[in-house]
Each structure stands twice: as C-alpha cells, then as structure tokens.
Amino acid sequence: MRWKVIRMNLKKSQIIELFGLPGSGKSTLARALQVQMPSLQTPPEKRRIGYIVLCFLRYPLRMVAWAVLICVRALPLMRQRVFWYSLSMLAKTCSDMGYAVSRKGIILLEEGFTQRLLSVATKPSSPLITKITVWSCVPQPNRLFVTQYKRELFKRYSASHPRRVNNESGFEEWKQTVTTQCLQILKEMNTGSWPIILIEADTDIAALASKLKDV
C-alpha cells in the first residue's frame, strides 16, 4: 500500500532541482521563489532517517553506487575530513530526495543529486564517465534550474572548511575541477529528457513562479 501511495504522489508532483557552481545564487533563487510561491515545498533543514531510508528503497543500486564513488574519490587522498563531509552531504541529499518523492505538489531541492555530482569530483571525469554517471546514477528531477547569477563563487568555503584545512593546493585543484565538471554535466543534461531553465541575474522570478503555478 505504501508503494502505491508513493507512485500516486510522484504522478502529481513536480520536483525542481537547482544546479550551479557554489556561490552562483542557488540559495538566493530558492528564497525568492518561496516568497513568490508560499505553497512551494522544500525539505527540512535537518536530515531525517525516514526520508534517507525511503530514498534508498526507491534507488537502492544508485545509492550503493554513490557510496562507492565517494569512497573511491576521498579515501586515496587520505583526507578523512573530506570523506566524512562528503558522506554527510550525501545523507542530506538522500533525505531531501526521500522527502520529494513522498510529497504532492511542487518540491524544490536546493542541492539534489545532479548538484552532488560537482562536489564528489576531485579530478575531472572523462565525458564517457560523466555521461554514465548522469544517466545511471542520478535520480532525475522534472526540471533543472541552472543558476548563473554573477556572484563571488566558492565564497562560503572558509579556511576552516573540511575541503581547505591543511590542503589549500588541493582545494584550488578541486575548484578548477568543479568549474570544468559543471560545463560537462550541463552538456550531458542538454541532451536529456527533462527541461533545463537558465536563471540569470535579470530573470523575472515573479513570472517564473507564475508559470510554475500553472503546471
């Protein structure tokens, strides 16, 4: 019975995921859309075990693949703080997706699995690996909003952030990788089955919200 309810909810829901470089305006866009659309649903700030389990039950092989991917990326670098930080972010993403698939209406994910592809990479993947990861390991949203605000990128990564502690050169390499990977992921997304909407600084958020309400 529970799985039937989830399927019914999925048919009546629209999952929107935000995508973009760190500091490109995802949080700003999310707040602006919530002002324009009070009915817009967003996951709770804290991770919920129940939602993580629900996500795992719906995408078991993908979740195992993601756990392996994080281990392969982080452990060879002997950076335990990055490893645990990556697992923590994956848990939050799983919780958010579990929330989304259990709801009706329009659900906004500030950082979904598409966005998580950026943070996992320590070195740019080949186009083939990116394509396989995108189409095989990413639960696809109904729409992908790509933020292109002109802001100071990577600003939130302070000196105490796990990605920077005692490894400034590694952090700079990661920044370059994320920037390269962002374009590569978008290239694959443009050939996909769900709409990509570019959000720039002059985008009319009220008009965008109005279109979403008509869906």
Image: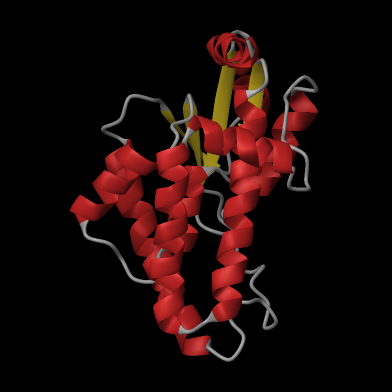
Residue 95 is left or right of residue 133, and the answer is right
Q: Residue at x 30, y 35 (%)?
A: 190
Q: Quadrant of the N terminus?
A: top right
User: Is 73 or 156 nearer to us in this picture?
Assistant: 73
Name of the residue lying farthest toward the front: 1
Measuring from the top left, give residue 22's x and y in whole percent. 56, 59
Measuring from the top left, give residue 120's x and y in whole percent. 45, 62
Res. 109 in view: no
Looking at the image, residue 211 lies above or below residue 169: above
User: Is 62 or 147 nearer to us in this picture?
Assistant: 62
Q: Residue at x 34, y 53 (%)?
A: 183
Name of the residue lying farthest toward the left: 128
Q: Residue at x 58, y 91 (%)?
A: 166
Q: Residue at x 19, y 51 (%)?
A: 128
Res. 35 in view: yes
Looking at the image, residue 116 lies above or below residue 197: below
Measuring from the top left, give residue 188's x and y in whole percent. 28, 42
Q: Quadrant of residue 84?
A: bottom right
